Image (cartoon, grey):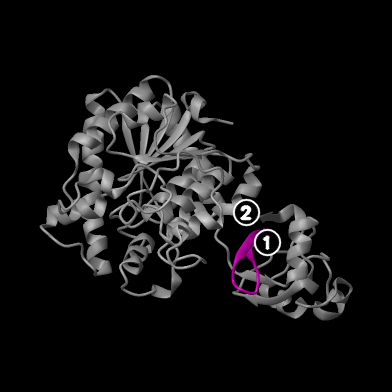
Amino acid sequence: MLTRRTLGEAHRLVIKLGTNVVTRQGGGGELALDRLEALIGSVARMRRAGREVVMVTSGAVGMGMRVLGLRERPRSLGLRQACAAVGQGKLMGVYTGAFAKLGVTAAQVLLTQEDLGDRDRALCVRTTLMRLLELGTVPILNENDSVSVRELVEHRRREGAGDDGGTTAFGDNDGLSAQVAVSLDADLLVLLTDVDGLFTTSPAVDPGATRIDELAVVDDEALARAGVKPVAGGDGDPARVPIAMSSGGTGGMASKLEAARLASGEGTTVVIANGAAQGVLERILGGEDVGTFIPAAERRSARFRHIAISARAQGALVVNEGALKALTEHKASLLPIGVVAIDGMFEKGDVVEIRDGSGRVHGRGLVNYDADACRRLAGHRSDEIDALIGTRGYDALITRDNLVLG
């Protein structure tokens, strides 16, 4: 497991560049070319030194705005998709040209959530990326905003334009970079933003805020403090003040913490740092105290990683307190008697979430019966399965070896 001092041993890296790293603030989508070329130079040196590097970039919508002469970020979903379509080629041209000058070949890969949510497609993505790395290229990844509305819908929701049905998204490429890092068994994920890392409180409102140099685990408390809504606590309690968030883009610090929790929980070390800091990538790999370091947990098998993060949940089983205690404390399978409700429509073998009565997700698993059968079985004993649905393939709705908690 990598420590801050041994980050230089990282061989396979995923580096995510946020919108406020790629573009100038208040610049109408203008690229921060000096900053971007410096980072490209650092990545090229890593590549020539034998490291494998994948980059995940934002900035296509902003670039498209600039090309189309739009001064304000469009609120129309269709117009944002058009900006992405125009801007992606221009943005990739900058990367391709800059890397070519340094003797490195860049490769464009556009992804949607479905590409990593389906097991067969996810394996194809991994195979393609691994082959590109073997060929000595630097893959440049972005969510395909011109056909996938998820990131754009999420940006609109964050701006207060409505919930849009609770659609989930990669989240300004933060979630995409984390999923790719896990898929590739990357040693290190670097999330570059426009702040120096996580802070004890928001520096914008608290002059005494200090950078958190290491976050041992991304828990619910850290996520709550990074969100817009306050966590429990009295008025004036610093825990109610959000941790420093980036000043633009669609992700913010909460999105980066979610990505960090996903990646670190699946065995990839994470560093959140300021992409504008001079020599930031060399300093990170040199073990300097830069940004916020989040150590990796023990890496799970590919099958459990697929259940935990890759596959999209098709529904949910809502469990009572007794079942939740049996799952978490006694490592039991999920029996039908502990299930109180079924959400969604799913088939046998699909991934479903395990939720408590408040809606909190505690895990995911491969379900042994379809949704209709689960609804008939919920709240009943396992020895009643035959009588209720006519067949008894399993005593549990989810067996322990197909269940991932946390």
Q: How many marks?
A: 2
SS of the residue under disc 2: helix
Residue 314: x and y, percent? 58, 66
Q: Nearer the viewer, residue 88 or 362?
A: 362
SS of the residue under disc 1: loop
Whether 371 is drawn above or below 242: the answer is below
Whether 23 is drawn above or below 42: the answer is below
Q: Which residue is mark 1?
A: 349
Q: What amino acid is labelled 2 in the image?
A: Ile
Whether 97 is drawn above or below 322: the answer is above
Examine the rendering and report whether any part of residue 10 can be seen: no
User: On the rendered image, what quadrant is the N terminus found in?
Assistant: top right
Using the rendered view, name the quadrant where residue 362 is placed. Answer: bottom right
CA separation in Å, label 2 and label 1: 11 Å
As drawn, the label of residue 307 is 2
For label 2, the crowd category at 10 Å Cα-Cα, with few meaning under 14, some 14 to 19 and many 20 or more, is many
